[in-house]
Image (cartoon, rainbow, N blue to C red):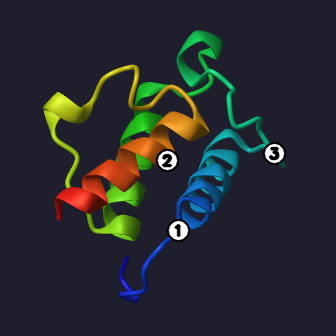
Amino acid sequence: MKDGLALTESDIRGYVHTLLCDLLLKESIPADHDLKDSGALNSIMFLQLFVRLEEQFEIHITGADVNQENFRTVESITRFVRAKRADV
């Protein structure tokens, strides 16, 4: 993260939740809300999600990373970000 502080899973989950709420114009969404099956995010929103995750967490999302399981829910995105940060 840009400020160099270690992040907990809860910190990451909180940011992901806030980011998705901003993109979806919602006050809150359940952590297990299925973004794919609900059709909640369009392709532009997914690009915005990727860019903001890369900027916030200083990770690089590759084409191989972009699959349904990594970006299906708040929880799966949180796990993905933690794994990518561990690779850095």
Q: Is residue 39 above or below residue 81?
A: above
Q: Is residue 29 left or right of residue 40?
A: right
Q: Residue furthest right?
A: 27
Assess disc 1: are there few (<14), some (14-19) or many (≥20) residues with their C-alpha within 10 Å of its C-alpha.
few
Amino acid type assigned to the residue bearing label 2 in the image: Thr
Which residue carries the number 2 mark?
A: 78
* Total number of numbered discs in the rendering: 3
Residue 75's x, y, as percent? 57, 39
Mark nearest the camera among 1 and 3 is 1
Mark nearest the camera among 1 and 2 is 1
User: Splitting the image into 4 quarters, where does residue 69 fall?
Assistant: top left
Q: Is residue 75 above or below residue 10?
A: above
Amino acid type assigned to the residue bearing label 3 in the image: Ser
Q: What residue is shown at x 49% (from left), y 47% (from top)?
A: 78
Distance between the Cα atoms at labels 1 and 3? 21 Å
Which residue carries the number 3 mark?
A: 28
Which residue carries the number 1 mark?
A: 8
Q: What residue is shown at x 59% (from left), y 54% (from top)?
A: 13
Asked which secondary structure carries label 2, the reply is: helix
Asked which secondary structure carries label 1, the reply is: loop
